[in-house]
Amino acid sequence: MSKTAIITGGSRGIGEAMSMKLGELGYNVVVNYRSASSKALSDAIAAKLQETYGVKALVVKADVSKADECKNLVEAAVAEFGDKIDVLVNNAGITNNSNFIDITQEAYENVINTNLLSFLHMTHLVLPYMVNHSSKEDQCSIVHTSSVGGLTGVINQADYCAAKAGIIGFSRAIALEFAGRGIRSNVIAPGMIMTDMLRGVNQDELHALAATIPEGYIGEVSDIAGALEYILKAPYLTGQIISPNGGFVLM
């Protein structure tokens, strides 16, 4: 039987790489996006998933910082692919990059709602479609994208770091609560990864940034997709953090 995966924020950067990895692994993929500007990107990913891997793909617009839109997303997935969800990748995220004394309450609440509460919303909604179908032999998996910012402080990222640290605590609690019931929960905490945001940085600044990493270079989105593949194929792994970061943060 075909399997189903939902990924939030799956239309670009790390999300796109993980969406394609899910297709490569044989999952039908529900690709979530939020802004109208990402629809074309999401549609292109869906077409590529179908053409390259022969899987089905569903594109769903939803602002996952809002519980009602998370509900619509999960309901759309179930209507399309049935009432078992095998994988949930909580990946949606934003950042303010602002000094905490200057930031507005609305801005930091938006980061917390998107980067943390959306993970709670989606997990709460998806778990019933996992717990009633999973077993030791047929596991379901929840994978949360955190950040090295959740492992250590980052200047001008207090709200972001708070959310990313919260993800780790949440994932560990879910791992313990559902251990032995065929549901695993793990975290990927990326370090500096080459995305569109970094490609737009001054090249001298980019080289200086790379020099702060022990391995001497900035990672690629494929490094994060590879971590996702490992987690999905590792039945004895739960409650853990995998952090591809080139030695920038040692755990």
Image (tube, helix red, strand yellow):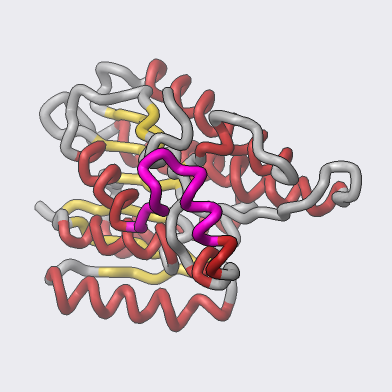
Residue lying at 19% horizontally and 52% vertically, measured from the top left: 3
Position of 169 relative to 102 (above/below): above
Position of 218 relative to 40 (above/below): above
Q: Is residue 101 visible?
A: yes
Q: Which residues are magenta?
A: 206-221
Q: Which one is nearer the viewer's eye here, 178 or 220?
A: 220
The image quarter in which residue 80 lies: bottom left
Residue lying at 28% horizontally and 69% vertically, measured from the top left: 57
The image quarter in which residue 35 lies: bottom right
Q: Is residue 127 visible?
A: no
Residue lying at 72% horizontally and 53% vertically, measured from the top left: 97
How many numbered discs, if any? Answer: 0
Decide if residue 189 is on the left or right side of residue 70: left
Residue lying at 54% horizontally and 29% vertically, measured from the top left: 151
Residue 208 included in the magenta stretch of the image: yes
Decide if residue 42 is on the left or right side of residue 99: left
Position of 183 relative to 45 (above/below): above
Residue 103 included in the magenta stretch of the image: no
Image coordinates of residue 29 in percent, x first then y, are: 29, 61
Q: Which one is nearer the viewer's eye here, 13 or 245?
A: 245
Image coordinates of residue 183 in percent, x first then y, are: 29, 29
Position of 136 relative to 147 (above/below): above
Decide if residue 220 is on the left or right side of residue 75: left
In which quadrant is the C terminus drawn?
top left
Q: Which one is nearer the viewer's eye here, 174 or 248?
A: 248
Image coordinates of residue 126 in percent, x first then y, are: 41, 42
